[in-house]
């Protein structure tokens, strides 16, 4: 039990990031899927999802994960989400050309983009 607590304490920020990220992901993915379902182009659905997610996630990640309530980090946070958006839409565009299921592709992108966002937030936004 002591080793488990030690492991948790060493990785507390990353574990909190994953838990908060799960909530944020459900929020953002639901928005993306809804707009895709009603016929909005995937790039617009991803943009709406990213903007809504950015506003929601800035508060949750900053306050809960990184214990930072300062709005001075918003420009860097926005840059991370812009990078995430353009990488994601690039993959979606390529996969759309190959007639892949975009719901599935967006779900597959969740893990690598979560890791990338965590690293950028830890070392760039909230360093």
Image (spheres, grey):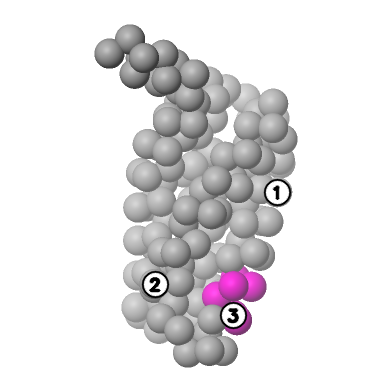
92 magenta-colored: yes
Front residue (pair 114, 73): 114
Q: Which residues are magenta?
A: 89-94
Of discs 2 and 1, which sits in the foreground?
A: 2
Identify the element where label 3 is drawn: helix
Whether pointer 3 and pointer 1 mark residues with C-beta atoms closer than 8 Å, the reply is no
Whether pointer 3 and pointer 2 mark residues with C-beta atoms closer than 8 Å, the reply is no
Answer above or below: position of 19 versus 29. above
Please state the horizontal and vertical placement of residue 19, each as a whole percent of the image: 37, 36
Q: Which of the two discs, 2 and 1, labels the residue nearer the N terminus?
A: 1
- Category of crowding for the residue at label 1, using alpha-carbon neighbours closer than 10 angstroms: few (below 14), some (14–19), many (at least 20): few
Please state the horizontal and vertical placement of residue 111, each as a whole percent of the image: 47, 53
98 magenta-colored: no
Which residue has dot 2 on it?
A: 104
Q: Which of the two discs, 3 and 1, labels the residue nearer the N terminus?
A: 1
Please state the horizontal and vertical placement of residue 15, each as a whole percent of the image: 42, 31
Q: Residue at x 70, y 49 (%)?
A: 79
Q: Is residue 74 visible?
A: no
Q: Which of the two discs, 3 and 2, labels the residue nearer the N terminus?
A: 3
Estimate the spatial distance between the alpha carbons at disc 2 and disc 1, rounded to whole Å. Answer: 26 Å
Estimate the spatial distance between the alpha carbons at disc 3 and disc 1, rounded to whole Å. Answer: 21 Å
Q: Which mark is residue 93?
A: 3
């Amino acid at each position: 039990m002591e080793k488990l607590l030690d492991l948790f304490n060493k990785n507390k920020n990353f574990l909190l990031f994953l838990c908060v990220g799960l909530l944020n992901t459900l929020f953002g993915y639901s928005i993306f899927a809804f707009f895709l379902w009603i016929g909005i182009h995937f790039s617009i659905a991803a943009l709406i999802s990213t903007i809504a997610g950015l506003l929601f996630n800035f508060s949750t990640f900053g306050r809960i994960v990184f214990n930072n309530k300062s709005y001075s980090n918003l420009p860097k946070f926005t840059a991370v989400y812009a990078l995430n958006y353009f990488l994601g839409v690039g993959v979606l565009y390529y996969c759309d050309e190959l007639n892949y299921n975009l719901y599935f592709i967006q779900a597959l992108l969740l893990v690598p983009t979560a890791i990338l966002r965590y690293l950028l937030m830890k070392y760039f936004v909230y360093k």
